[in-house]
Image (cartoon, grey):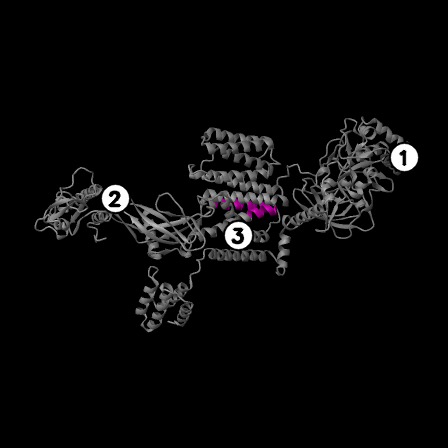
Amino acid sequence: MNDAQPAALRGLDGVLVALAVAVAAHVSSLPTWITLLLVAAGAWRWTAHRRSWPLPPRWLRVTAAAGATVAVLASYRTLNGIEAGTSFLVLMAGVKLLETRSSRDLTVMIFICYFLLYAALLRDQQLRQLPWLLAGVLLATGALMRVHAGTVGDSLREVLRRTAVLMLQAAPLALALFLLFPRLPGPFWGIAAGESARTGLNDEMTPGDISDLSVSGEPAFRVRFLGPVPPPAQRYWRGPVLHEFDGRSWRRTRGQAFPQQEIVAVGEPVEYQVTLEPHDRDWILALDLATQWPQREAYRSFDFQLLALRPLTELTTYRLGSYTRYRAGLALPESVRRKDLQLPQEGNPRATVLGRQLAARHSQDPQAIADAMLRMFREQPYVYTLEPPKLADNAVDEFLFDTRKGFCEHYASAFTFVMRAAGIPARVVLGYQGGELNPIGGYMLVRQSDAHAWSEIWIEARGWVRMDPTAAVAPERIERGLIGSVGANEPVPGRLRQQSEVWFQVSLAWDAANDLWNERIVRFSAAGQMELLERLGVEDPDWRALGLAMTASLAAFFVSLSAYLAWKYREPPKDWPARLHAVVARRLRRRGVEHDPTEGPVAFLDRAVGACPDLAAEIVAIRDVYAALRYGPLPTETDLRRLKFLVNRLRP
Amino acid sequence: MRAAFDQRLQAWLRRRQGVDRDPVLLHRRRIYILPTRLGIAYAVMVFAMVIGGLNYNNNLALGLAFLLASLGLVAMHHCHGTLSGLGLRLLATDSAFAGQDVRFRLLLDNRSRAPRPRIGVVLGSAAFRPVDVPAIGSTTTEVAVAAVRRGRVPLARFVLETRHPLGLFRAWAVVHPAYVAIAWPRPAEPGVAPPGVETDTGGAQDHARGDEDFTGLKPYQAGDSLRRIAWKAYARGRGLHTKQYAGTDVVSHVFDWDSLPGLDVEARLARLCRWVLDTHAHGEAFGLRLPGAVIEANIGTAHFERCLTALALFDRGDASE
C-alpha cells in the first residue's frame, strides 16, 4: 500500500483476498463463466487501483448489473435458492468491484463475503471445508477492521492477528449460543429443493457409459448396528429398483401404481441406525430388506424400496430394522409380472436367443436358468474391470458375446435381460454392497465406491430372489470390496489406504472425526439441547431452562470479558514506595486531605501534616523515609521495611 | 429552537458532570457507546443469518451467525475498553488572530499496558483525525476552534471518540474542560506606517549602541566607563583612551493608544496589532502604551506574544493574562 492512494480505499487488497476465499468455496458449483467474470473483474480492479485508472462510467455499471441479473435468471429461471442466489451474489460482487470508490463500497463487498460463506454452509456441512470457511471469516473480518478502524500503519498480518484474537474471544459465546439458542421445530418458509448434482446413486443405469461413482471415496452413509454386524456377503444396501429397459438404459417405473407385496421374515431382525449423507433423492439405503422404519417419515414401495417423503437434502438419520433372510412377494400381481418381463421390441437379438435357449434347455425352471447364466459368467472368460470398453447400440449383445469386460452394471443388466428373455420376471436393483467397520467410531462406513448393481428374479414359492452376477465373475468384490477385485493399475479410491498401515489408521480416524462432527454438530437439535441440559444436572429440562441457561452464559461471558479487558488495560505495577504512598493518600482521604495529581508526593505529605496535626509525627516520619528511599543517596532494604511498618501503623 | 434546546441540554450536562480539571481521567462510567450505521447493518445481516439458519434447520449456518454476533459483542467491549481509562490534559494553546483557528494541543495519556488505537476529537464539523496512543505512552492531538473575535476563546466541551476495532460501535466521552486560548485582534490592513522612532525612552543613548565588536580607540572623555579604558595603551604611555565598540542598530518604537484619536476601540487595536506585527517582523524593538498598561520596549517572541495578548484582552477583564 502506498501513501498516495485515497484513505477511503485503504483495505482494497484485504477485501479482494477475502472475496477470493469466499468465492473459492463455491467454485465447484458455480458456472465457469461466472467465476471467470469475477476473476477478470478482480484483476481489472486491482490493476486500476495500482495504475490509478478511472473507474467505468455509471451507464456501464448499470448495464453490467442488469446483464448479470438477466444472465442468472436465464441460467436458473430464478434468483431464489442457494445455487442461483450464490451465482447472483458473486456476479453482484463483480459489478461492485467496478465501482469501489469508497469505504462504503468495500463494506458492501465484505458483507457479500459473509453471505457467500453463509451460503457455502447452507449447501454443504462437511467438516473438511470448515478451516477454509473459518479462514474466510477471518479475512473478511480483518478487511472490515482494516477498512473501518484499523490503525494506519498496520500490516495485513498484524490486522489478521488482532482479528484472530477477537474471534478466539468470541468463540466461547458463539459456542454457548450454538448449544443453547432454541431451535425451531419447523421451517418458516419453503425450502428450495436441492439443485446441485451431488455424487450418489442415479435412478437410471446405462451400462457402457462412464460411471465416476466407483472412483469416489466419498462417504455415502454410516451405519451403527445395535446388535451383531451382518457378514460381508449379506451387506446389500437396497436403493432404487429399475424396471424399465429401452435397449440401452434401465429406469424406475413412473406414474403407475402397483399393489403392495407381502414379506415373510425369517430369523432374527438386524436393528441399526443409518445416517445418510445428503443425495437430493428420496431413497433411503436400507439393508435388504427393510421391515421397520419411521412411519411418519418414510414408506416402502411395492418393489421394497424405502422412500423418504422429501428428498434428502441434508444429513439425515433413520432408525431401521431389516431381515437378511425373507420371502418377499410370494404372490406376484399380473401388473408387476408384466412390468418385469417387458423387453424392447428390437435390439440385442443374440441375448434374446440365449434367453430362449436357456429356457428351453432347463424346461422353464427359473433357478436352473439363473444358475446356467451365472455358470456362463464364471466359466467363460469374463473380466471384472472398472475400465470397460465403450458399448454401442446393442449393448447387451456386445457385452455378452464380444467385449466380455465390465463391472457390476454390465453384469446385472445382461443377466436381467437374459432372464426376461427366458420368461422369468426380473429387475435390476441399485444400491451399495459392503461397508468398512471403523473401530475408532464404532460404526460402519459405506462409501460411494461401494455402489453396486444386482438383479432380482421371481421364483414360484420363493418370491423375489437376489441374484448377483458380479459375485460369479468376481467373488472377491463381495467379500473384500472393490480394491480386491480389480487389476492393480485401475484407479480405485483407497488403494493407498490398503497399502500403508499408518495411512489406513489416519483415514479411519479422519472418518471417525467426520462422523462425530455429523452426529454432534450437524445434527444437533432441540432434543440434543435437552439432553445436554440433563447432563448438566437440570431435571426435566424445558424451554425455560434453556432460556435461563442461555441468559446465564451470556452474563458469565460479559463479566469475564470485562474482567479480561480490565486486566488487559491494567496499569503496570508501581514500585513499592509509590504503592505505599498511594496507601497513605487513600488513608488520608478519609481525613479530607485529597491528593492532587499535580502535587509532588513530599509536598502532599507536608500539606497533610498541616491538615492533621494529631498525625504530624507519623506523617513526618513517613515523609522522611519516603524521601530517603526516593531521593536519598543510598536507599536500603531497611528503609523500605521501615516505610511499610510506618504506613501500616498509620490509622487515621 | 433546536439549537436552543441543544445548548440547554449541553449546559445541563456540563452542570451534571461538572467541569473537568486537568488531568482528566475518562472513567468507564463516562463512556457512552452505541452502534454505528455500519453496526446496525451488521446486526441486520446477522439477524437474517440466524433466521435463515433456524428456517433451514442448519446448525453450521447458525454457528456462523452466532460467531459473527459474538464477534460484534466482543468488538463492543473492546471499543468501550479502548476509551475507558484514557488520561487527557492540555499541553499548550496556540493563539491565533481573530478569524483564524486557535489550537488546543492535548496530550492523550495511556497508563495501561494495552495500546489504545484510533482515538480522535470530535468538535463541530471538523474532520475526524484519530491518533493511536501506544501502551504506557502518550500521543498529542489538537482541537482547532475558530476564533470569531479577539479575546479569550474557551473550549468548554468536546467529544473524544473511537470506533476501534471493527467500526461497528462508536464509544465516546464528553469532556467539559476549562481550557482557554487567546485570539489576538485581527490586524489592520498594512498601509499606515508606524510612528517614528522614539529615542527618549530609557534615557540618553547613542544611536550606535551595542558592544559586540571592537572598532577602535578614542580619546578619553570624562564620564566614559572605567571598564572601557584601554589600560594596556595607557601602560605603554599613549595616554587615556576609551575602547570603542559597535553593535547592531536597535531601533525602539513605542506604540501609543493615544496616538490614534478618532478611531473606535477595535480599529485602534487592529492598527496597533498591525504595527506590532510589522515591527516584530523587522526585528526592531517596540513597546506598547495602552490605557492602564504599559509594556516597555523589547524584542523577542515572548515579548511579541505578550504585546498581542495585551491587545487581545484589552477591555476584556484582567489584562495581565
| Residue B57 among those drawn in magenta | yes
Relative vertical location of residue A207 with respect to residue A180 in this rendering, above or below: above
**Residue most toward the left?**
B222
Q: Which residues are magenta?
A: B40-65
Q: How many marks?
A: 3
In front here: A359 or A607? A607
The numbered mark at residue A364 is 1
Q: Quadrant of the C terminus of chain A?
A: bottom left
Task: Give the structural element (helix, strand or loop) at label 3.
Answer: helix
Mark 2 closeness class: few <14, some 14–19, many ≥20 residues within 10 Å: many
Relative vertical location of residue A563 with respect to residue A159 in this rendering, above or below: below
According to the picture, the residue beneath numbered tag 2 turns out to be: B98
Task: Give the structural element (helix, strand or loop) at label 1.
Answer: loop
According to the picture, the residue beneath numbered tag 3 turns out to be: A169
Relative vertical location of residue A202 with respect to residue A585 in this rendering, above or below: above
Residues flagged by tags 2 and 3 on a common chain: no
Label 3 – label 1 distance at C-alpha: 76 Å
Residues at badges 2 and 1 in contact (C-beta under 8 Å)? no
Q: Is residue A256 left or right of residue B181?
A: right
Relative vertical location of residue A360 with respect to residue A122 in this rendering, above or below: above
User: What amino acid is found at the position of numbered circle 2 in the picture?
Assistant: Ala
Q: Position of residue B304 (x, y in %)?
A: 22, 47
Residues flagged by tags 2 and 1 on a common chain: no
Q: Looking at the image, is mark 3 or mark 1 earlier in the sequence?
A: 3
